[in-house]
Amino acid sequence: MESIDPAILDKARSWLSDSFDQQTRDEVQAMIDHDHALLVESFYRDLEFGTGGLRGIMGTGTNRMNRYTVGMATQGLANYLKQYFHDGEQISVAIAYDNRHNSPYYADVSAEILSANGIRVFLFDSLRPTPLLSFAVRHFDCQAGIVITASHNPKEYNGYKVYWDDGGQLVPPHDHNVIAEVMKIRDPAMIRFGRNSELIEMLGDDFDDVYIDTIGSLSLSPGLIHKHHDLKIVFTPIHGTAVRVVPRALSAFGFSNVINVPEQDVVSGDFPTVVSPNPEEAAALQMALDKARETDADLVMATDPDADRVGIAVKDPQGKYVLINGNQAASMMIYYILEQWKQQNRLTGKEYLVKTIVTTELLREMADFYGVACYDVLTGFKYIAEIIRMLEGEKTFIAGGEESYGYLVGDFVRDKDAVLSCCMLAETAVWAKEKGKTMYDLLLEVYLKFGLYHEKLFSLTKKGKAGLEEIKEMMDSFRFNTPTEVAGVKVLKMLDYRKSQMTDLETGAEESLDFPISDVLQFLLEDGSKITMRPSGTEPKIKFYIGTRAKLERAEDYEALRNGLDLKIERFIADMGVF
């Protein structure tokens, strides 16, 4: 016992009190008696209620997702809602959940606590995509929303995301204020358990219809869909929440030939057919690609478990299916949308796009061409939603996106929406088909018109307490020993979002950055390349984003030019010495 930090041991022993159920007490005692390593990982810190909520491994302890950490978060949220909306009006909160283990349970615990605090709850009767939660918050004029999900994290994880009354995730000042209230809840005795069933209303399939009807109004080419309704689409929800809603939405848009992957239509928190349910990873789409080859499909789409992100694959000129990354998919879809808005005379000069600082600069290039504003925000769709809220009534939001496969069209939802994105990507494919092109051809059309922007993401996973310290040391090393060149290319500027400062490395001049404080570093290179590094806010990782660009003169030069940019990226990452 001498090897355990006394503070950790005291914290664990506090969970042996009568405030905790017997099963929890037994599990804590077993760790104290037999598994010190697990004890340390479970109690060395409190699971942080960050600006978006909770995310962590499920289990017993302060650093785990469980009835008590979820309960404390919900009680803190309830307390803040009652303070902020204190005019006597009935406060309401919508709650949704995904297919992960314990998701229905955590959702029910949250509903119980909110109702015990006199707050009305709209609780989905079964698993639903995250964008439906955002839509429900707006539809029912709720003051907040909760979705139980860990997105694409491994099966051991779950999470708890909080939304505000605009349907977007929490942003300042509400995020910090909710965190402050959650931190005040130090003991389960402070949580109001005790369901008030009269305040809980269940939402079923009828509400799905309202959502699907609403997003259907965003379709720009219903005539083309009718003409090419039999476009072959392979779709997989990868065992997640999109299993029913995406096929229904595609059908409502007019697509009649949606081919499923039966093994992955099985809803399961074990994700039995994949190692990771992440549509960014090629292995997660393997079964869908097999089905596409079997059926000669035009388009492959796969959503993550909570259906806010979508990955796609298309045929190249040799008939081979190739994966399209998030930057490419966003660029094709937004190119289609901008072109349609132009053709339909809908561009008035008051429209805009929003992207994150790590998303391709190709979106800005297109926005400039069409006379549309383009705003940059920090990584996280909540910042895109914040811009929409700020400009509401003044300008018209067309679309937004982030490189991590999350996109939004229109403002009915205020978070990334894979359900709507599937429909709009399929519509983009139909537009290309009408022009005698594949989606791959359309991508080359974009590059020929606006330039070849080529990006790659590199991630390092560093688990546990030691991993967090290693990531911090890595960021500090780049921050305080700033490179003047990378692989022979001069670094012109460093943007330090933690200091809200941009430094010209040639002159030493400094400028303020108008962004929230975030632990992000960005280097702008002389050849137009951009290198960004940031610790993940949801996973034990540090991520490196490298973006390059070149002019593409002829379609037949694409592969050679792309390969050249790949080599440049490899030289950059090798010279940085982190892999």
Image (cartoon, rainbow, N blue to C red):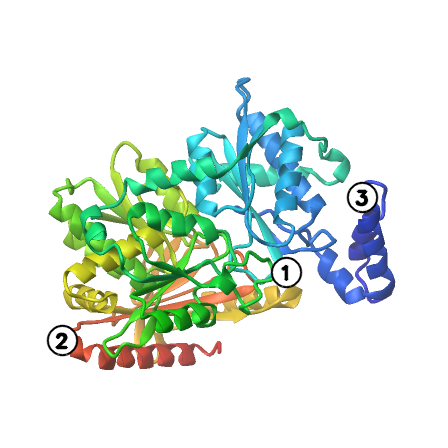
Q: Are marks 2 and 3 in contact (CB under 8 Å)?
A: no
Kind of residue indicated by mark 1: Glu
Q: Residue furthest top?
A: 88
- Determine the CA span between mark 2 and mark 3: 67 Å
Q: Nearer the viewer, residue 326 or 491?
A: 326
- Dot 3: what SS? loop
Up-down: is 430 above or below 19? below
Position of the N terminus by quadrant: bottom right
* Residue under the image location 69 percent in, 54 percent down: 45
Please name which of the two marks, 3 or 1, marks the residue nearer to the observer.
Answer: 1
Left or right of 361, for residue 35: right
Position of residue 407 measured from the top left corner of the image (x, y, whole percent): 35, 52
Would you call the spot at circle 2 few (<14 residues within 10 Å), some (14-19), or many (20 or more)? Answer: few
Kind of residue indicated by mark 2: Arg
- Determine the CA span between mark 1 and mark 2: 48 Å
Give the residue pinned by disc 2.
554
Position of residue 189 measured from the top left corner of the image (x, y, whole percent): 77, 35
Give the residue pinned by disc 1.
156
Q: Which mark is residue 329?
A: none
Position of residue 29 measured from the top left corner of the image (x, y, whole percent): 86, 56
Q: Are marks 1 and 2 in contact (CB under 8 Å)?
A: no
Q: Quadrant of residue 38?
A: bottom right
Would you call the spot at circle 3 few (<14 residues within 10 Å), some (14-19), or many (20 or more)? Answer: some
Would you call the spot at circle 1 few (<14 residues within 10 Å), some (14-19), or many (20 or more)? Answer: some
Left or right of 31, for residue 419: left
Which is more N-terminal, label 2 or label 1? Answer: 1
Q: Which mark is residue 20?
A: 3
